[in-house]
Every structure is written in C-alpha cells, then in structure tokens.
Amino acid sequence: MNITDVRIRKVEKEGKMKAVASITLDGEFVVHDIKIIDGEKGLFIAMPSRKTGEGEYRDIAHPINSATRDSMQKLILGAYEKAVAEGTLE
C-alpha cells in the first residue's frame, strides 16, 4: 500500500488542531479528516474518529501497526510543513 496523494486543509479556529489531511492510497481509496495536532511533544496525526454514546472517541479508520502509522505520519507532517513553508495551505 502506498500513499499516492496528500492534501492539507488549514483549520481556521485557534487551538491545537492546525490542519486536516486527506490521503489517497494506491490512487484508489481516500481517507479524509486526518487531524494534524500540535501536542506537548510536537506535531502528530489523529485518525478520523466519531463520538460513541458513552462519550468516548473511536477511530473510524486506522493503521494496524506502528510502522504503518509512523510512515503515514511522516508523509502527512512532511506535506503539512512544506505547505506552511510555501504558504500554500488551502
């Protein structure tokens, strides 16, 4: 599986969430609403989630292993940092 496209959208509200990403996998499948968050230890991604009836948030889609998550995070944060540097956030 390869990430063939990354699109970054700026979040207008002030706060820890800086942007939202969409990724395309193998040019055939898209995952929207991956959040880019500025945490205590720096930027990280949070997968799309929804709130349960008990008030907890559960991921809708997510990588199965940490190597895939790390690779995905590296590509998404790289695209975000490039967009910030170039001033091209949508």
Image (spheres, rainbow, N blue to C red):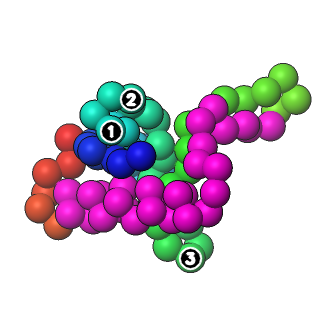
The mark found on residue 26 in the picture is 1
**Of 25 and 55, the residue lying toward us:** 25
Residue positioned most to the top: 53
Q: Are marks 2 and 1 in contact (CB under 8 Å)?
A: yes
Main SS, magenta region, reads helix
Hey, what amino acid is under mark 2?
A: Phe
Whole-number angstrom distance, CA of label 3 to CA of label 1: 31 Å
Find out whether residue 27 is within the magenta segment: no
Residue bounds of the magenta highlight: 56-83
Hey, what amino acid is under mark 1?
A: Asp
Q: Is residue 74 left or right of residue 68?
A: left
Whole-number angstrom distance, CA of label 3 to CA of label 2: 31 Å
| Residue 52 visible in the snapshot | yes
Q: Is residue 83 left or right of residue 29?
A: left
* Secondary element at tag 3: loop
* Secondary element at tag 1: loop
**Of 77 and 61, the residue lying toward us:** 61
Image depth: mark 3 or mark 2 in front:
2
- The residue located at (45%, 62%) in the rendering is 71
Residue 8's x, y, as percent?
Answer: 29, 45
Residue that carries the numbered disc 2 in the rendered image: 29
The mark found on residue 41 in the picture is 3
